[in-house]
Image (cartoon, helix red, strand yellow):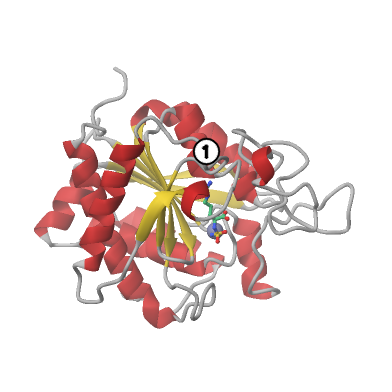
Amino acid sequence: DATFGWTRYHNLTEIDAWLDTVLANYPEVTMGFVLGQSYEGRDIRGIRISYKWGNPGVFIESNIHAREWITSATATWLINELLTSKDESVRELAESHDWYIIPVLNVDGFVYTHETDRLWRKTRQPSLISDCVGVDPNRNFDSHWMENGGASSDPCDETYAGPHPLSEPEVKALSDFISILKHKMNVMLAFHSYSQLLLSPYGHTAEEFPDNYNDLMQVAKAYSDAVHGLPYGTIYKYGSSAGILYPASGATNDWAYNEKDIKISYTIEFRDTGNFGFVLPAAFIKPNAEETLIGIMALLAESKRLRYLEPKYN
Ligand code: 0X9
Ligand code: ZN
């Protein structure tokens, strides 16, 4: 779409309008869906791209953290590429998986970053016990919630876990959606920024590792190697979330792994490594998006080789 050139960051209204155009242009292979409504009543929208019934499912969540604009910019670029690319390897990628992509999960927070506070992270639901607003939605999922210091019980903290698991309507909506479709989802990717990392479960503990940790690292290595091989030579490190970053409990991809049996599950922290951080200039959108596509291609090829893309149940 010529009006959406990925040369600047777009707000929610623009992203929604663009999504409508995409859905209208590709009615045969796309389906729009609404996960649910945010606290402030906005639709949380998603797109399914499917060329063939019964393909392995890849779920992509982006902008659960409001200020991480590079994530929705990359997700929309990816959607466009999957639908329009003439490159044979991209066509193969697009057509041999069922894609479920949420460009902006934390819609209220995202609008707030555009209108009021560029560095807002959390949701916008007020607290009943404090004047501070919002919950870290990536600490609000119902798996090892609040364990091991991986989240805060202080409503003023950036990693406030919320009054109880699934207190945030955005998180509840995503949780319900995946619960219904879990047998179709082979891969879950949560887009974040920044630090250039591929983070596998677990987030709640660095003492234990998932059963298939070696496979998860092998798949992450495939992504990292592919990205490193590109002209930019960007370095992505990988490891378990708690192991190489910090304890974070109640995150989307840990919940998907632990509770929904989605065994290829990562948080991907995009560019950069801290020079610009969350306020990454728009000139980085295309390089970041391009290497993400190449990385995902390698990730899925390796996942397939290790037999993670087989139908989960009949
Ligand atoms: O802290 C977070 O939620 C993520 N980092 S960010 O800077 N984007 O906020 C990392 C979460 C990774 N941990 C787990 N998946 N458990
Ligand atoms: Zn984040």
Location of residue 124 in the rendering, given as x and y in whole percent from the top left corner: 72, 56
The residue at 83%/59% (across/down) is 132
Whole-percent x, y for residue 127 in the image: 83, 50
Q: State the residue lying farthest toward the left.
A: 88
In front: 220, or 126? 220
**Residue 59 x, y percent position in the rendering:** 39, 43
Q: Quadrant of residue 170?
A: top right
Q: Nearer the viewer, residue 281 or 107?
A: 281
Is residue 307 positioned above or below 269 on the image?
above
Residue 82: quarter of image: bottom left
Q: Quadrant of the N terminus?
A: bottom left
117 sits left or right of 91 in the view:
right
Instruction: Using the rendered image of the protein, determine whether residue 55 is visible from the camera's viewpoint.
Output: yes
From this viewpoint, is residue 27 visible? no
- Three-letter amino acid code of the residue under disc 1: Glu
Residue at the limit of the structure toward the top, as seen here:
314
Residue at 38% across / 26% down in the picture?
183
Specify the quadrant that holds the C terminus: top left
Which residue corresponds to the image point at 52% horizontal and 74% vertical from the top-left?
Answer: 277
Question: Quick check: 271 above or below 242?
Answer: below
In the displayed structure, would residue 313 be above or below residue 165?
above
Q: Residue farthest to the front? A: 207
In the displayed structure, 131 sits above or below 139; it is below
Question: Circle 1: is it few (<14), some (14-19), or many (20+) Cα within 10 Å?
Answer: few
Residue depicted at x 31% and y 39%: 214
Name the element at disc 1: loop
The residue pinned by badge 1 equals 207
Ligand 1, image quadrant it occupies: bottom right
Return the x and y of residue 14 as percentages of the image width and height: 50, 69
Between residue 131 and residue 243, name the one nearer to us. 243
Report the number of discs.
Answer: 1
